[in-house]
């Protein structure tokens, strides 16, 4: 009898190796069929949508295939602007962290298309349960940059009164639920919110994100069970960016099956989507919205993308992956791909792109300076009295006594 051999997943390349994505099977744009939103989740076609990669933009930037959405050029320009602004803003705030102006920061470089496209597809009364890499959701909805800067600097004008980490944003009026560092919880909260919407006979749906690493947690499976059983109007998105903080996607099961394929076990449709393709993200989201609005319940979407930057300012990715790996990611840069598509339509060019970039750079600079004028980390703080506000509807004697002792 042979002894067992424990399998330990290993990435295809480590620091010092040549980046290697030869193991990935990526079909050409337009190859994956598009089922009707009303199709039964048990239909064979969902095997193709869950195991392939839904792509719209080909290598020349043309929109091809059955998933190509109808988007007017102005909406495409709006999406491109939101992605560009996100990248410029995050680059500026990353530098601010290095200058000691904030305590912590995270970037979404390479993933900007996901939040921007989905923000534009969903309605103002729908609710997003985010991760910390969908800042483009807020910027696609014109959330004030100064409010972001003030929160990141944790200063006197912080809209969250110093009660959250710098990048754990919250903006109810923009359909952006309070962000949590415990990512797995996003799925359960979104499903509960969607169930409540259906219970109240409302018409608002929920959308949630987690990273692929969080699919290994119980929250993921519990949420899928409730979403399936109660036909919750929710879109559950797994951002598979290949790396958790230091472990690659195989630790969460990426080498065994796609994350979209997990939907089948819960009787849900699964879509695996090119997360660097703005049009594909838009089309898949439109499809899932149509299904939810037909009262047919939830959809699981895996966004296949790549985390270009470090996990956070506390992380050094050169310790666990090749330094040049991001440059070799086969699905390219979402900003460049949308720019190429717009240029092919005659709706954009290098001169307009350069001008837009300059204008957005100045917008970011002005917002950063305005925040710095109020104060950066430790130089300005919300008043101490704020710790007692918004906690209890009617403060009890202990809270009142503590407030009196502080003289606030």
Image (tube, grey):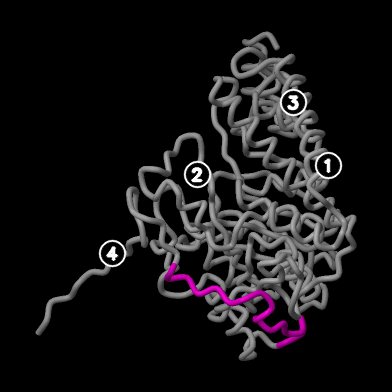
Q: Is residue 140 visible?
A: yes
Answer few, some or many: residues within 10 Å of disc 2's Cα (few below 14, many 20 plus, some between 14 and 19).
some
Residue 129: percent from the left, percent from the top? Answer: 68, 53
- The residue where tag 2 is placed is 311
Secondary structure beneath disc 2?
Answer: loop
- The residue where tag 3 is placed is 365
Q: Which residues are magenta?
A: 22-39
- The residue where tag 1 is placed is 142
Answer few, some or many: residues within 10 Å of disc 3's Cα (few below 14, many 20 plus, some between 14 and 19).
some
Residue 132 location, quadrant: top right
In 3D space, how far apart are the residues under numbered discs 1 and 3 (Cα atoms)?
16 Å
Question: Where, quadrant-wise, is the C terminus in this rendering?
Answer: top right
Q: Is residue 36 magenta?
A: yes
Q: Nearer the viewer, residue 219 or 211?
A: 211
Secondary structure beneath disc 3?
Answer: helix
Q: Is residue 41 above or below residue 317?
A: below
Residue lying farthest bottom? 44
- The residue where tag 4 is placed is 8
Q: Main secondary structure of the magenta part?
A: loop
Identify the mark nearer the N-term, 1 or 3.
1
């Amino acid at each position: 009898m042979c002894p067992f051999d424990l399998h330990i997943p290993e990435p295809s390349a480590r620091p010092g190796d040549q980046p290697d994505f030869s193991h990935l099977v990526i079909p050409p744009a337009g190859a994956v069929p598009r089922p009707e939103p009303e199709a039964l989740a048990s239909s064979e076609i969902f095997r193709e949508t869950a195991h392939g990669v839904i792509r719209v933009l080909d290598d020349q930037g043309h929109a091809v295939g059955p998933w190509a959405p109808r988007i007017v050029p102005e909406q495409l320009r709006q999406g491109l602007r939101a992605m560009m602004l996100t990248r410029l803003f995050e680059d500026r705030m990353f530098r601010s962290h290095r200058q000691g102006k904030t305590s912590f920061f995270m970037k979404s470089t390479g993933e900007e298309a996901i939040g921007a496209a989905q923000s534009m597809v969903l309605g103002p009364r729908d609710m997003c349960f985010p991760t910390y890499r969908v800042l483009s959701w807020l910027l696609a909805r014109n959330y004030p940059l100064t409010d972001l800067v003030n929160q990141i600097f944790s200063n006197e004008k912080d809209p969250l009164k110093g009660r959250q980490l710098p990048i754990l944003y919250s903006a109810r009026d923009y359909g952006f639920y309070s962000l949590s560092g415990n990512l797995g919880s996003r799925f359960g909260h979104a499903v509960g919110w969607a169930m409540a919407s259906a219970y109240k006979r409302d018409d608002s749906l929920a959308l949630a994100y987690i990273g692929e690493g969080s699919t290994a947690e119980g929250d993921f499976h519990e949420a899928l069970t409730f979403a399936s059983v109660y036909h919750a109007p929710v879109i559950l998105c797994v951002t598979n960016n290949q790396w958790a903080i230091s472990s690659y996607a195989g630790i969460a099961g990426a080498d065994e099956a796609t994350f979209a394929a997990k939907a089948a076990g819960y009787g849900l449709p699964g879509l695996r989507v090119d997360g660097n393709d703005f049009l594909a993200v838009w089309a898949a989201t439109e499809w899932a919205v149509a299904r939810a609005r037909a009262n047919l319940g939830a959809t699981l979407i895996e966004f296949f993308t790549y985390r270009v930057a470090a996990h956070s300012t506390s992380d050094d990715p050169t310790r666990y992956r090749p330094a040049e790996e991001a440059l070799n990611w086969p699905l390219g840069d979402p900003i460049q791909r949308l720019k190429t598509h717009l240029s092919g339509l005659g709706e954009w060019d290098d001169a307009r792109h350069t001008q837009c970039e300059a204008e957005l750079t100045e917008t970011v600079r002005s917002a950063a300076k305005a925040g710095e004028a109020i104060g950066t980390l430790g130089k300005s703080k919300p008043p101490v009295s704020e710790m007692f506000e918004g906690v209890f509807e009617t403060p009890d004697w202990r809270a009142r006594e503590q407030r009196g002792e502080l003289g606030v």
